[in-house]
Amino acid sequence: MSVRIDARTVREPDALLRCGPPLDDDDIEVRDLVLVVEVLSPSARSMDLAGKLEGYFAPPSVAHW
């Protein structure tokens, strides 16, 4: 499943959690996600902590604790 960050950016997190009715079988984008999980790897750590982290906070449904 993918997450739309903005009009030009779509990400595929390692895991996500959403609340709501079941998605259609052909849905590929989650619009009502609550939690995003991205596993950091040593080789991609700097990229994951920079643009990806900030982008995952963009969808209004993501919970901020």
Image (spheres, rainbow, N blue to C red):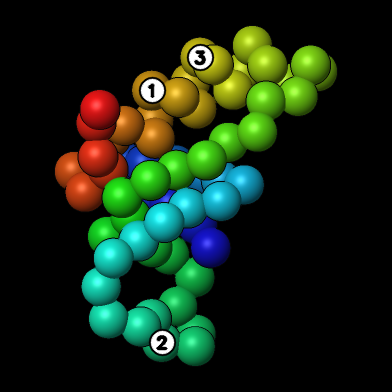
64 vs 6, nearest the viewer:
64
In primary-sequence order, the first of circles 2 and 1 is 2
Question: Residue 49, relative to residue 6: is it above or below?
Answer: above
Q: Is residue 32 left or right of residue 40?
A: left
What is the C-alpha distance between the residues marked 2 and 1? 28 Å
Q: Is residue 43 left or right of residue 45?
A: right
Question: Residue 26, relative to residue 7: is it above or below?
Answer: below
- Quick one: label 2, few (<14), some, or many (20+) residues within 10 Å? few
**Mark 1 residue type:** Glu
Q: Is residue 8 visible?
A: no
23 vs 47, nearest the viewer:
23
Q: Residue 49: horizontal and vertical position, in percent?
A: 54, 16
Residue found at x 39% / y 30%: 55
What is the C-alpha distance between the residues marked 2 and 3? 32 Å
Q: Is residue 17 left or right of residue 38?
A: left
- Quick one: label 3, few (<14), some, or many (20+) residues within 10 Å? few
Q: Residue 32: horizontal and vertical position, in percent?
A: 27, 60
Question: Residue 26, relative to residue 4: is it above or below?
Answer: below
**Mark 2 residue type:** Asp
Residue, disc 3: 50
Q: Residue furthest left?
A: 60
Residue, disc 1: 54
What is the C-alpha distance between the residues marked 1 and 3? 7 Å
Looking at the rendering, which quadrant does residue 44 occupy? Answer: top right
Question: Residue 60, relative to residue 19: is it above or below?
Answer: above
